[in-house]
Image: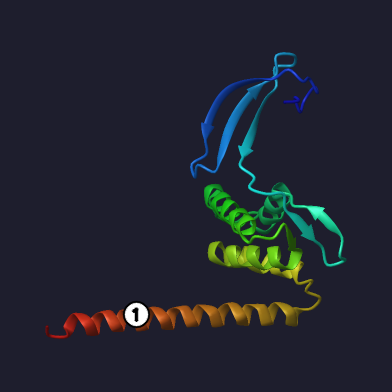
Amino acid sequence: MRCPYCGSLDTQVKDSRPTEDNTAIRRRRVCPDCGGRFTTFERVQLRELMVVKRSGRRVPFDRDKLARSVEIALRKRPVETERVERMLSGLVRQLESLGDTEITSETIGEMVMEGLKQIDDVAYVRFASVYRNFREARDFESLLDELQLGERKAEALAKLKRADRTASESEPE
């Protein structure tokens, strides 16, 4: 592994351990030439995925690029890194299990938005504003209306489930 500090090809692994969700191996490395320390991650890749951009151009799927865009949406938000990592790993597994080697950027964007909606509403709105290319305040208003409608539906569903449970518990046997 090439040292990111001095470019030396001779680095040594000092520690290896699985990540908490067991989807990768985390390796701490040290460069004997410059003494630099860095971390690498080794992940299983089931198939080579290609992203089909809106322009029709095809580019290799880049998990790190996806992670950076999610990190930007989550900047200064109180979300645990581990939770984000689980979301990203799950998303990549979903993409790999779709069966296609070519996936549209729209599919990826929608999946990321769905994942962010579960984690943090503000990050969801941030990501959506870039992904959907918002141009005016009305765009934000309609997205927030969608978000509130979804929350109201979830609350109503939870109330129905509680009512069903209460009714079934009070029924004589």
Is 68 or 99 nearer to us in this picture?
99
Q: Quadrant of the C terminus?
A: bottom left
**Side (left or right) of 154 relative to 58:** left
Q: Position of residue 116 (x, y in %)?
A: 60, 63
**View extreme (front): residue:** 99
Residue 86 versus residue 123: which sits nearer the camera? 86
Residue 129 image point, x, y percent: 73, 70
Q: Is residue 28 above or below residue 31?
A: below
Compared across the picture, whether 3 is left or right of 160 comes to: right
Q: Secondary structure at mark 1?
A: helix
Count residues near mark 1 (Cα–Cα under 10 Å), then give few for <14, some for 14-19, many for 20+: few
At 54% from the left and 61% from the top, the residue drawn is 119
Seen from the viewer's position, the closer of residues 111 and 166 is 111
- How many marks overall? 1
Q: Residue furthest top?
A: 33
Q: Quadrant of residue 133?
A: bottom right
Q: How is the image coloured?
A: rainbow
**Who's the residue at 56% across and 80% down the image?**
148
* Residue pointed to by mark 1: 161
Give the residue at x 58% y 77%. Answer: 147
Which residue of the protein is positioned furthest toward the left in this rendering? Answer: 173
Give, as a three-letter code, the residue at label 1.
Lys
- Percent of width and height locating residue 21: 49, 45
Give the quadrant of the N terminus.
top right
Residue 33, x across and y down, in percent: 74, 14
Q: Is residue 131 left or right of residue 29?
A: right
